[in-house]
Image (cartoon, rainbow, N blue to C red):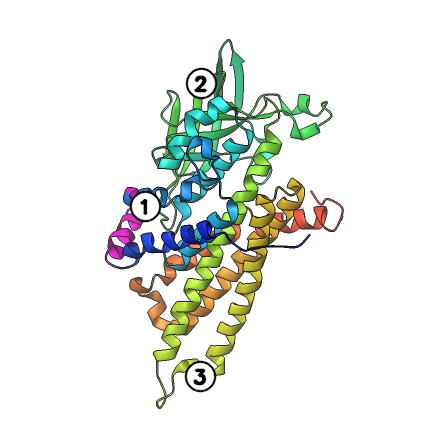
Amino acid sequence: MSLNFNLSEENHMLVDAVGEAIKPWTSERKVELRDMVENSVFPEDLWQTFADVGLLGCLVPEQYGGTDVGLLPLALGFEKIAAMGVSPNMLLVTCMDSACLARNASDAINEQYLPGIVTGQTKFCFAITEADAGTNSFNMKTRADLQGDRWVINGAKTYISAVEIADYMLLVARTTPLEEAQDNQMGQYFGLTLFIVPTDAPGIEKQLIPIGFNEGVGQYSVFFDNVEIPADQVVGEVDMGALVMFNSLNPERILAAAMCSGMSRHALEVASDYAKERKVFRDTPIGAYQGIAHPLAACKAEHEAARTMMLKAAWAFDENWDSARVGSLANMCKLLNSESALHSVDVAMETLGGSAFVKETGMLQLWNGARLLKTAPVSREMILNFIAEWELGLPKSY
């Protein structure tokens, strides 16, 4: 099958519109945005900018107010934002949730939530991780029990991004005990269910996890004490949520890779511009020295190769390739782009020297973001496990 990454004129216009809309946040509002992020103040104006240019509707069908243009133009929008030195991190979870709803939820659920997502009025977060169920999601203990016409939820989640600004969360909870699920023909893939839970529902407590740097949204532990939701607030089928959850992680990893691609581009542009002008000995710019030029050139080659894998993964998702194959591509592109971003930022900082540590350059914040995306939302080691098992047919190691 031939690969075709060509965008329609409409999609080119979307990416161009994103660039134009972000410009004020890279110039006259740059300091304002930096101060908001550093002080954990959510930039509502920037969020609305993202909604107004159509990014929040890319994965939403037209009948619910979206454009349904697909993941590829959305990924290029993410890349464009990051390449301009602005983090689209706040967009990531709501966009992956909108894809999850559009592909798996009932018409009634989608009518209820998707139009608000498209306009920016409704924000979502995703609640999967638990203290004893991070990498191993099957080990989660949070329970949901059907009592009459209500689901009653008890348990705890941790490292939940943006729950403080989200209106709703997509919550993954166990509806059949793991020991009973093992008797089902689906094994451990049976017994988990996705729910839509208001973040202000009675019985929910949120505790901020202090993080060493800010990205505009916080990380929280969330506790559920007899939280009740209507019985119809289920995404997909009861007990069949594991596959829905894992398939929803594919666009997350692809969009994270797109962010990393943009970070690489931004770091290399800043470093190259500096190396063309900075002179130390005689009248020769430091960019003429191979000790400076070659590391930057190597990063450029790595970036272009990783970016191509990101484009292929997004395209395959839009083409509805087999979910396991899309999963492999999503993992590969996340691996390659996160490592490329971290390498590019590191080399850029070496190029800038002391200037890399000046707040105005944004390099330290960029390094933090790139390093985070090497570990989250899935670690390098788990990605390699997936590729070894699903692509190479090697025995499972865990």
Disc with the residue nearer the chain's start (2 vs 3): 2
Instruction: Tell me what residue is drawn at x 25 percent, y 56 percent.
Output: 31
Cα distance between the residues tagged 2 and 3: 64 Å
Is 211 included in the stretch rendered in magenta?
no
Q: Amino acid at mark 3?
A: Ala
Front residue of this view, candidates 5 and 283: 5
Cα distance between the residues tagged 2 and 1: 32 Å
User: Which contiguous range is marked in magenta?
Assistant: 28-44
Q: Between tags 2 and 1, which lies in front?
A: 1
Residue 129 visible here: no
For label 1, the crowd category at 10 Å Cα-Cα, with few meaning under 14, some 14 to 19 and many 20 or more, is: some
Q: Which residue is mark 3?
A: 288
Q: Percent from the top left, x then y, of residue 264?
A: 46, 62
Q: Which residue is mark 2?
A: 229
Q: Percent from the top left, x then y, of residue 318?
A: 57, 44
Q: In this rendering, would 307 be left or right of 289?
A: right
What SS does tag 1 mark?
Answer: helix
Q: Are marks 2 and 1 in contact (CB under 8 Å)?
A: no
- Rendered image quadrant of residue 5: bottom right
Which numbered marker is on residue 49? 1
Front residue of this view, candidates 10 and 284: 10
Cα distance between the residues tagged 1 and 3: 40 Å
Disc with the residue nearer the chain's start (2 vs 1): 1
Which quadrant: the C terminus? top right
Q: Are marks 2 and 3 in contact (CB under 8 Å)?
A: no
